[in-house]
Image: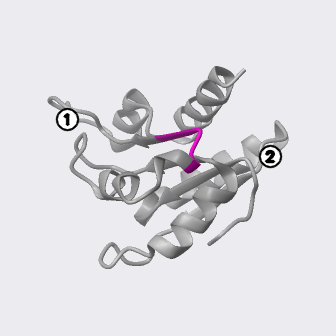
Amino acid sequence: MLRKGGDVTIITYGIQIHDVLHAADTLAERNIGAEVIKLDFLAPLDMRTITVSAEKTGRVLVFEETAGGTGVGARIIAGLNPGSLKWAKVMDLGRGFVQHGDVGSLRKERGLDEDGLVSAVMEELSRER
């Protein structure tokens, strides 16, 4: 765990950790505590750490750069008790063809950057009200 928080659990791995940590800073400025879990291993998953955090915050967002529904996020969500969550979401590349181009521009287009992550958390939290 890289950062403790009580409002939302954000799980990621690889190079995207930088965007996640920056997003967590932005969320903190809005009084939203993001707990950030960086997966050091994709197999086996540390479901104990993930489950404890998910049950604490009640909200889970997995942020990964994979094709829609094919990544670790789907395994994580499937391994959690839905009765203990307000919501759980996977942010990924989605389905369909991804254009070629500058990586930063493509991530932004798909919402897989700091701004997209902050927007996704804010949108999910607004639905609770």
Label 2 – label 1 distance at C-alpha: 34 Å
Tell me where residue 12 appears, x and y as whole percent.
47, 59
Residue 52 within the magenta-colored segment of the rendering: no
**Residue under numbered circle 1:** 100
Q: How is the image coloured?
A: one colour
Residue 42 position (above or below residue 73): below
What amino acid type should be assigned to the residue bearing mark 2? Ala
Q: Residue at x 22, y 43 (%)?
A: 67
Q: Residue furthest left?
A: 97
Question: Which of the marked residues, 2 or 1, is nearer the chain's N terminus?
Answer: 2
Q: Residues within 10 Å of mark 2 (few under 14, many from 20)?
A: few
What amino acid type should be assigned to the residue bearing mark 1? His
Considering depth in this image, is 62 or 105 the residue closer to the camera? 62
Of tags 2 and 1, the one toward the viewer is 2
Q: Is residue 60 visible?
A: no
Q: Is residue 104 visible?
A: yes
When asked about the image quadrant of residue 123, the answer is top right
Q: Residue at x 39, y 34 (%)?
A: 105
Location of the C terminus by quadrant is top right
Location of the N terminus by quadrant is bottom right
When asked about the image quadrant of residue 14, the answer is bottom left
Q: Residue furthest front?
A: 83
Considering depth in this image, is 77 or 1 the residue closer to the camera? 77
**Residue under numbered circle 2:** 28
Q: Which residues are magenta?
A: 84-88
Residue 50 position (above or below residue 84): below
Disc 2 is placed on an element classified as: helix
Tell me where residue 28 appears, x and y as whole percent.
80, 46
